[in-house]
Image (cartoon, coloured by chain):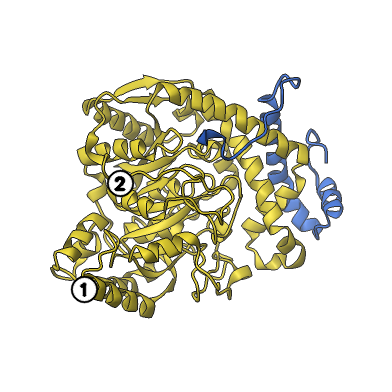
Chain colours: A blue, B yellow
Amino acid sequence: MASEEQPTVESILAGAKHAGLPLTEDEAAELVKGVGRMQDMARTVRSLLEPATEPAPVFSPGEWQA
Amino acid sequence: MTMNDDLAFLTITDLARAIHDRKVSPTEVTRAMLERIERVDSRINSYITVTSDLALQQAKQAEQDLVSGKDAGPLHGVPIALKDLYATKGIRTTGHSQVLVDWIPDEDATVTTLLRQAGAVLLGKLAMHEFAFGAPGFDTPFPPARNPWGPEHITGGSSSGSGAALAAGLCYGALGSDTGGSIRSPAALCGIAGIKPTYGRASRAGVLPLSWSLDHVGPMARSVADCALMLEAIAGYDPKDPASADVAVPDFTSTLNNGVAGLRIGVPRDWFNEADGTHPEVLAAFEAALGVLAGEGAQIVEVDSAPFIKARAANTIIMISEAYAYHEDTLKTRPQDLSTGVRNRAREGAFISAADYVDAQRARVILGNHVRSIMRDVDVVASPAAPQPAETFEEQDPDARYRMPSYTPVYNLTGLPAMSVPCGFSSDGFPIGLQIAGRAFDEATVLRVAHAYERATDWHQRHPEL
């Protein structure tokens, strides 16, 4: 599911099928708000990474130990 | 010493002195604690499993050791309890979930072993939010822990039982775990102290995960000095935890009394305000706390708020993605064994793309660099620990929770040490917490500042009536 699309029951059911996750229509309806929230957060994260040409740092848990 | 509430609310520091001075024996204090759990805990549900026989056996052993001159240190003979995600050999470890309701580990978690070696007495396993994830639910095999300051109110989480048991005088110290604030939130809402050490400082081997790159373990207690004592016992390199840091462990208690004169305390003021949902009484308590620290000689310095405000989104994306990876098999094969709240929240992880996860880890480095650059100019950063005092179970609203600010996840994202210490009460009698965060592996300064504040105030000496 592309992050810019607002989630719907249908898109969530399709995404769940793709992931091999068993989900009923009612269960998909319960996820609409939460999945939308994750997409909002993903957009917030992307906004921190502009410009996209910056070298991509990779998280290393021990980096601050130096 | 009589077996009364005064004994129940002693700090570890004072209890250790009483044990070593032979004013009370480990067996006496353990028996008193077990009787109090039996009498009180049905009101707050802080324990899932009480290990009475083991506790009395360990207490008796501690007594014999101490009499024969074998002194393992200040935790020797002190009754403690563990959040029910620490593996305990031969003792059920459930994660507060139907999924693990019958799991009896073959081995101890590393920190369980370290506490045993320090002579601590294990009273039992404590309630938590299921798999340290989400909000307290009523569709788990055990009831949610309730706040001793008002049982209709939540404790904060996910180390809910740890916060409740300490506030209620049902153990002297506890371990919690913290992936986005799960030690500091219940510490703040229950009116006790809790520290999330630096990532890598204490081993997570044998601890049920929520999110491998964000999970931390740490102590909770009724004083800052007690947290320092427990942290000393559990800190250190462990090859069984791939994130464990081979860094020397200092004597955290030796610098506790050095005071704050001359220290610089950074305050990212734009991070917390009433318009964003921070309770005015929390803001007032925080400002008063800064006044106390300034009165003790600290210099209060305003710092850039931007990385603190932006960190939560990256923390959430990483946490939900990694939690989905851990729970994926359960979600596909036995989803009915997870509570509705955890099931739904974990399922959200299936809809976060790989690119979103990688971007969150990239943002983590950028934000981490920014926070560390701020930390170079100050000794610690202060903030409220939680935006609101404890709400009621009925008032819980996940949407509202996401709209509110959150002051804890930035230190999971950056791995920096942070602790909560009591700094006041709301007008309806619920605790408020002050968060102090520091540089990597500088828990000593975090503890020193928190101790200086605690020494100048008496919030930590108040206890709920049960």
Q: Residue B71: where, in percent of width, then height?
A: 25, 65
* Residue located beneath label 1 in the image: B68
Quadrant where the N terminus of chain B sits is bottom left
Please state which amino acid type lies under the numbered disc 1. Ser
Q: As drawn, is B126 to the left or to the right of A53?
A: left
* Residue located beneath label 2 in the image: B224
Q: Label 2: how many residues lie within 10 Å, few (<14), some (14-19) or many (20+)?
A: many
Q: Label 1: how many residues lie within 10 Å, few (<14), some (14-19) or many (20+)?
A: few
Q: As drawn, is B310 to the left or to the right of B351?
A: left
Calculate the distance from the C-alpha at mark 1 to the C-alpha at mark 2. 31 Å
User: The residue marked by circle 2 belongs to what chain?
Assistant: B
* Res B51 label: none
Q: Are marks 1 and 2 on the same chain?
A: yes
Between circles 1 and 2, the one closer to the viewer is 1
Q: Residue B344: where, in percent of width, then height?
A: 68, 54
- Please give the name of the residue rendered at 50% of the width and 63% of the height, measured from the top-left corner: B109
Q: Residue B129: where, in percent of width, then height?
A: 53, 58
Please state which amino acid type lies under the numbered disc 2. Val
Residue B422 vs residue B226, the one in the foreground: B226
* Residue B426 appears in the picture as rendered: no
Q: Is residue B351 above or below residue B6?
A: above
- Please give the name of the residue rendered at 76% of the width and 46% of the height, measured from the top-left corner: B351
Q: Secondary structure at mark 2?
A: helix
- Please give the name of the residue rendered at 22% of the width and 61% of the height, measured from the top-left corner: B15
Residue B16 vs residue B35, the one in the foreground: B16
* Residue B291 appears in the picture as rendered: yes
Q: How many marks?
A: 2
Hey, which quadrant is residue B68 in on the image?
bottom left
